[in-house]
């Protein structure tokens, strides 16, 4: 029977070797992308963040998603790493399901396209990049020129379309980072509230005292004399921001509950030497 742990270690080792080998290949070709402590998908995603933000500031990219996106309000992967590390110190089994892990898949593909655009790439480099980011080689190449227009217009159309796709991937990646940061902030708030409630519950009996009657009367009189507060602004419950914040809060509750009530899965007893008939008889006897 194949050992899944050994297989996983073997796959991780192979992935590290492939990334290191590709990195050395790129550096020998004049490319400098990442150090050995950073995974290739993460490095490509960071490359996308750097390039796309400059592209949006310097050129007029026709991307519909830019309409409701603030380019000056960006999140970083480092922020998520810091928040996860801080929560990992507060919650022993923080986010064992990986809800707040960053997904680099789409951003890494867009970052690989940027690498292809920096200078002419060999077929070997294209193949290795496609393998690392998990896509088809054709996905990294330019689309074919349309034949119904002139050559210059066709080249401009293909170039603009590629820039639009890259910016769209950048915006999707930024939205993911903002959403993950929102979840982490909700988890941090819930973790702090849990500590406060625990402390209050332990000290409730010691600090429980009935205030004097004259003080109660004075408090009631003060409340009557107080000017009514103005109605606060109520956000639209059907707005996209409100819905996503509620969803982030729900996921944060699940992350916190799983972190506190963490249970390891017990292995299922299985005897390779036992036949099906013997197993049925043993279960019937039990």
Image (cartoon, rainbow, N blue to C red):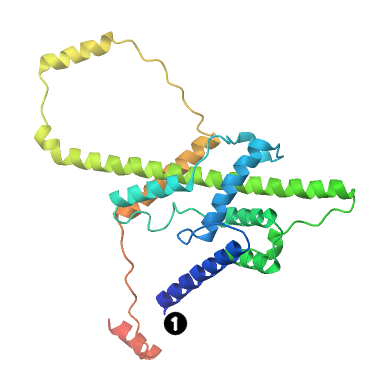
The residue located at (80%, 47%) in the rendering is 157
Give how far across and how far down residue 187 sits, in percent. Answer: 37, 45
The residue located at (69%, 62%) in the rendering is 121
Say if residue 134 shows up in the picture: no
Is 122 positioned to the left or the right of 254 in the image? right
Say if residue 183 shows up in the picture: yes
**Is 197 drawn above or below residue 16 in the view shown?**
above
Decide which of 254, 12 is in the foreground and name it.
12
Is 59 positioned to the left or the right of 172 in the image? right
**Is 143 drawn above or below residue 231 in the view shown?**
below
Residue indicated by mark 1: 2
Q: Residues within 10 Å of mark 1 (few under 14, many from 20)?
A: few
Decide which of 2, 148 is in the foreground and name it.
148
Give how far across and how far down residue 97 sits, in percent. Answer: 41, 58
Q: Quadrant of the C terminus?
A: bottom left
Q: Quadrant of the N terminus?
A: bottom left
**Is 142 drawn above or below residue 6 in the view shown?**
above
């Amino acid at each position: 029977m194949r050992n899944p742990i050994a297989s996983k270690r073997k796959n991780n080792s192979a992935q590290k070797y492939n990334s290191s080998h590709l990195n050395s290949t790129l550096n020998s070709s004049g490319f400098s992308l990442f150090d050995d402590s950073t995974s290739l998908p993460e490095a490509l995603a960071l490359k996308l963040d750097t390039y796309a933000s400059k592209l949006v500031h310097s050129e007029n990219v026709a991307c519909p998603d830019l309409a409701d996106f603030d380019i000056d309000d960006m999140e970083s992967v480092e922020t998520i790493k810091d928040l996860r590390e801080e929560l990992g110190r507060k919650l022993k089994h923080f986010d064992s399901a990986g809800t707040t892990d960053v997904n680099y898949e789409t951003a890494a593909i867009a970052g690989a396209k940027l690498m292809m655009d920096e200078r002419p790439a060999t077929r070997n480099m294209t193949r290795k990049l496609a393998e690392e980011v998990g896509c088809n080689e054709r996905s990294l190449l330019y689309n074919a020129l349309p034949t119904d227009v002139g050559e210059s217009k066709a080249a401009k159309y293909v170039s603009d379309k590629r820039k639009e796709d890259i910016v769209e991937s950048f915006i999707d990646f930024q939205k993911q980072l903002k959403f993950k940061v929102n979840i982490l902030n909700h988890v941090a708030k819930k973790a702090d509230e849990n500590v406060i409630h625990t402390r209050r519950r332990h000290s409730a009996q010691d600090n429980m005292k009935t205030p004097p009657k004259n003080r109660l009367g004075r408090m009631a009189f003060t409340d009557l004399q107080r000017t009514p507060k103005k109605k606060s602004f109520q956000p639209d419950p059907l707005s996209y921001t409100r819905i996503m914040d509620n969803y982030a809060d729900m996921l944060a509750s699940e992350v916190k509950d799983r972190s506190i009530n963490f249970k390891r899965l017990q292995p299922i007893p299985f005897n390779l030497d036992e036949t099906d008939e013997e197993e049925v008889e043993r279960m019937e006897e039990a």
